Image: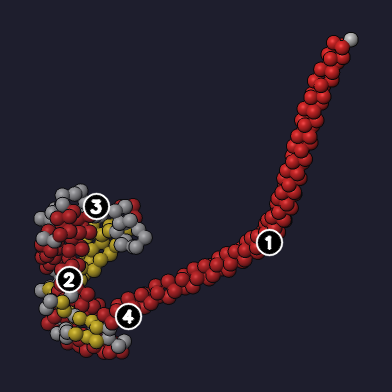
Amino acid sequence: MEAQNHALLGALAQEKARNQKLSKRTTRLVHEKKVIRQELNKRTEVLRTCNTALSEEKSQLASMSKRHSEELCSLRTVSHEKLAIAQDTTALLRHENGLLMKCLDRGKTGVQTAHILKKQRTWCARKSGVYTAEARKLVRRISKAGCAEEKVSDVISACAEAMGIKVIGIVSRRTVGRAKKEGGIYGLMQLGHEISQADGTNPFFNIRITKNLLGFGESSDGTSHRQTTYESVHASILAPTYAADVDDSDRSTWTQQLHFVEVSPAIDHTAQSQFENSQRLADDITSAYSGSPLASRDSAKME
């Protein structure tokens, strides 16, 4: 019996010790739970504070984003307005630049015209001491109009003075005569060139050319003035029209033309005198044309 009691007491003591351990463990766990809860509350509070701060920052960011969007829209509107103004200004400047360029071109043209007019207000009959081709042509035209050779220089000076042009160089009577003689040689050269290009021959001129000719004829007639016989010679030639809009190399455009050749004094009006005059005139045409650049260019020769 005592042994049973002693064993029961031992079991109770062990149970009591176990209960004490459990009690201590429970107390420790309750304490740890309390500590954990406090820590959790602290962290929850911290999280709540952070959440509040984040909400405020989010609100501020939203407000700033809205403000920035409004500012961006405003800036975009202002930029579009400034761009439109800049485009209008650019168009206006381009237009003004175009007007200025036109004014500059007109100014350059005006300056060039002024220089040209300044040069044109001075007419020089000679260049390097030689009468120019234009001057010789002018005196021939004035003389052809009926002006006496010694009055040609006076006519040029009077016309130039009326038009405000200064004339440098006086054309003498002898110069006018030489210019007229030069024009006659030019006429013989042209006549020889046209005869060489024609399609006929003339038994009176007795001209032989390197081509088969069939389009040239010559006629003469005479009259007397103050007991002096004069012979007038004309030539009918198939020649170019020399029109500006016609191709002279196209022989289909050529027409039969009557050219005045010369008027010269003669001993009498006999057939022999006319024949001799035609032979002399043929020699003059042959000499003038054969020695000219036209003959070299055309590879033609008169004999």
Looking at the rendered structure, the kind of residue marked 2 is Gly
Residue that label 1 marks: 67
Residue 159, image x, y percentages: 28, 87
| Front tag of 4 and 3 | 4
Looking at the rendered structure, the kind of residue marked 3 is Asp
CA–CA distance in space, label 2 to label 3:
24 Å
Q: Quadrant of residue 105?
A: bottom left
CA–CA distance in space, label 1 to label 2:
100 Å
Q: Which mark is residue 199?
A: 3
**Which is nearer the eye, 51 or 31?**
31
Question: Are the residues at dot 4 and dot 2 in contact (C-beta closer than 8 Å)?
Answer: no
CA–CA distance in space, label 1 to label 4:
67 Å
Question: Are the residues at dot 2 and dot 3 in contact (C-beta closer than 8 Å)?
Answer: no
On screen, 26 above or below 150? above
| Front tag of 1 and 4 | 1
CA–CA distance in space, label 3 to label 1:
102 Å
**Which is nearer the eye, 275 or 13?**
13
Tag 3 secondary structure: loop
Question: Are the residues at dot 3 and dot 1 in contact (C-beta closer than 8 Å)?
Answer: no
| Front tag of 3 and 1 | 1
Q: Which mark is residue 114?
A: 4
Tag 4 secondary structure: helix
N-term-proximal mark, 4 vs 2: 4
- Where, quadrant-wise, is the N terminus in this rendering? top right
Looking at the rendered structure, the kind of residue marked 1 is Arg
Residue 143, image x, y percentages: 22, 81
N-term-proximal mark, 4 vs 3: 4
Total number of numbered labels? 4
N-term-proximal mark, 2 vs 3: 2
Q: Quadrant of residue 162?
A: bottom left
| Residue 295 visible from this viewpoint | yes
Residue 297, image x, y percentages: 17, 55
